[in-house]
């Protein structure tokens, strides 16, 4: 977040850094300046125009309303308020006007998996009206934060050291547990080994076998795109990638469109990059997209058996557009509004 | 294949091993006996009842008809004959009766990606009649054979040795190319680095942006299930897993079904294992399925917005059921027929 604030247009006066009492007093750099971290308290929000929250759900639930009560507009990257009907859920390329309707003084930033496809689908929806989505995800370890990245790297070290692993059922599970978890097989942070594996589970379990992550893709897509009856099925799968989520998307529209028309429409979007020359080996892959701001789209195909339907593959950095970048972009929209811009 | 022939019921008299002239004279073990490899020639098929082919398409195209002309039934694991209307495409759990209609004396074994889901979908189709499939794959390196496995292991060694990789666009690509390909970035056997990455391309490019692998999933599913108008869209993606393909499947049926009914139906199949207790961390992952014969199914959910539709996740060993095991099972059906069994 500090890196992103340092590289974006400098629309801010003071930037105040706030964290738990434990981190108070630390000095961090933002916009090339040293800034001392303040301890979270109601008073830190006094005089603040925009308060960006990048904290667990329960901290946001408690403190975003405090910031709002003190006069700040809270832009929250947690899941605490995303489905609150009085809180807009905003992707600046898709529904920038929604930032102005914020009865609670809070604006929510979407889940990173949903965000991976929103800039692209928003553009296609504007022109052809989206009606159905079937999505399978390829989600990176960093969706589980720094501990997720460290765990994947540690597991990769284990499996790379033994040329026999991956050839019999459970051998990776046993080797990883032995090396990293004292042999215990109930401690895998991703639910199963992630190195040399994929894990069809992300988030927490909700009703009828659906995960929180899969329901977020459905419910947040509907809210951001403004299509309350959008039909969505998602299967969310973790893959051994450090950062950048990818999605295989099967999208059906109300009007007829061709793959060429969709490609041209996507290429015209300022924050979408089309990488779609498979004959030259050109398609998005997460390792080539990590650290980049745009959404990358490729493998755009007209479905052979489903009318008005495209199949495509999307990759986006879940730590940038999927998180801090979109939060900063929302905050900038608010700043522009507050300064009459 | 030799391992599988050695572990299956011993229905064979002589097992003759045949390879190119280069391998002739080698001694290999099958059923615990030493067998000398013979050079491929028309004469080697004389007196043979069933000839199992596990060779490239062009070798099968030339030689399966020779075997058939010499009186053998050719069971072919290549892509040469799969869509030939005079060649049955068989999954013993789904369409065993098809082995008897073989006007060319050739029976084809399906592509490994299609095979991953056929035992499960065949069972569901028998009861509820499948109408639509949307599939995203998580395909293992061994789909590209021994060189694919070796390449993935080499790439994993490169990325595991550098804690910084995976954090900026193209860093994995450059590191892998530098370590394994003299810096050349046009040599990646999987089209891009596979370690710490996923690659949305498998097979070769066909019309309108579809890959051979994606079209096989569509066309072979239709033929095996006997549903010429089955609607199918597939996106095939390679993942850094050694062996065992997985698929996220969105399947629509002509009749109403519940997830519980589907789970019970699948659990009743002798070659399907249901692993579906996500509350206990129980779901299929490829690292836990490699080396196993059955198809593993989990994450079975009733689609929230699509009537008569299930979302599920399937894993199956692409080198066993996906290849040699299904070939051996077809051959055993033929042997039973020839011996009046």
Image (cartoon, coloured by chain):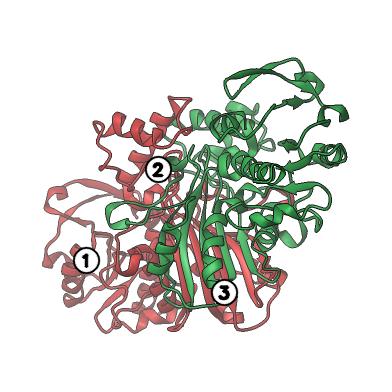
Chain colours: A green, B red
Q: Chain of mark 1?
A: B
Please identify, in this view, whether the residue under mark 1 or under mark 2 is nearer the observer: 2
Residue A130 screen position, x and y as percent:
57, 70
Please identify, in this view, whether the residue under mark 2 or under mark 3 is nearer the observer: 2
Q: Chain of mark 3?
A: B
Would residue A194 be visible to someone looking at this image?
Answer: yes
Residue B177's tag is none
User: Does label 2 or label 3 sit earlier along the sequence?
Assistant: 3
Residue lying at the far front in this picture: please name it. Answer: A340
The CA span between labels 1 and 3 is: 30 Å
Residue B194's tag is 2
Q: Is residue B210 left or right of residue A4?
A: left
Q: Which residue is mark 1?
A: B60
Would residue B266 be visible to someone looking at this image?
Answer: no
User: Does label 1 or label 2 sit earlier along the sequence?
Assistant: 1
Q: Quadrant of residue A69?
A: top right
* Residue B131 vertical placement versus A341 (above, below): below
Residue at figure coordinates x 38%, y 70% from the top left: B330
**Badge 1: how crowded within 10 Å, few (<14), some, or many (20+)?**
many
* Residue B151 vertical placement versus A31 (above, below): below
**Badge 3: how crowded within 10 Å, few (<14), some, or many (20+)?**
some
Which element is circle 3 on? helix
* Residue B80 vertical placement versus B28 (above, below): below
Residue A160 screen position, x and y as percent:
44, 31
Q: Which residue is mark 3?
A: B123
């Amino acid at each position: 977040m500090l890196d992103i604030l340092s590289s974006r247009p400098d629309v801010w006066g003071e930037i105040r850094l706030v964290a738990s009492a434990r981190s108070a007093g630390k000095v961090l750099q933002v916009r090339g300046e040293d800034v001392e971290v303040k301890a979270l308290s109601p008073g830190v929000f006094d005089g603040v125009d925009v308060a960006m929250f990048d904290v667990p759900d329960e901290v946001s639930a408690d403190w975003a309303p405090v910031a709002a009560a003190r006069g700040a507009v809270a832009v929250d990257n947690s899941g605490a308020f995303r489905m609150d009907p009085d809180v807009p859920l905003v992707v600046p390329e898709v529904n920038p006007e929604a930032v102005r309707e914020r009865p609670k003084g809070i604006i929510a930033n979407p889940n990173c998996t949903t965000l991976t496809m929103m800039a692209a689908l928003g553009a296609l929806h504007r022109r052809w009206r989206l009606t159905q989505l079937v999505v399978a995800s390829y989600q990176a370890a960093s969706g589980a934060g720094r501990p997720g990245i460290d765990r994947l790297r540690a597991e990769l070290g284990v499996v790379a050291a033994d040329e026999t692993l991956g050839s019999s059922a459970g051998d990776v599970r046993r080797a990883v547990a032995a090396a990293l978890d004292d042999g215990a097989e109930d401690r895998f942070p991703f639910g199963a080994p992630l190195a040399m594996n994929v894990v069809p589970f992300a988030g927490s379990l909700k009703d009828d076998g659906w995960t929180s992550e899969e329901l977020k893709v459905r419910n947040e897509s509907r809210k951001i795109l403004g299509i309350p009856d959008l039909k969505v099925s998602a299967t969310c799968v973790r893959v051994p990638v450090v950062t950048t989520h990818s999605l295989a998307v099967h999208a059906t529209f109300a009007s007829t469109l061709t793959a060429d028309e969709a490609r041209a429409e996507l290429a015209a979007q300022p924050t979408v990059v089309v990488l779609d020359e498979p004959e030259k080996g050109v398609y998005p892959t997460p390792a080539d997209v990590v650290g980049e701001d745009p959404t990358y789209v490729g493998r755009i195909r007209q479905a052979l058996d489903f009318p008005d339907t495209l199949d495509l593959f999307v990759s986006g950095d879940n730590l940038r557009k999927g998180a801090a970048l979109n939060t900063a972009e929302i905050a900038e929209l608010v700043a522009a509004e507050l300064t009459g811009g």
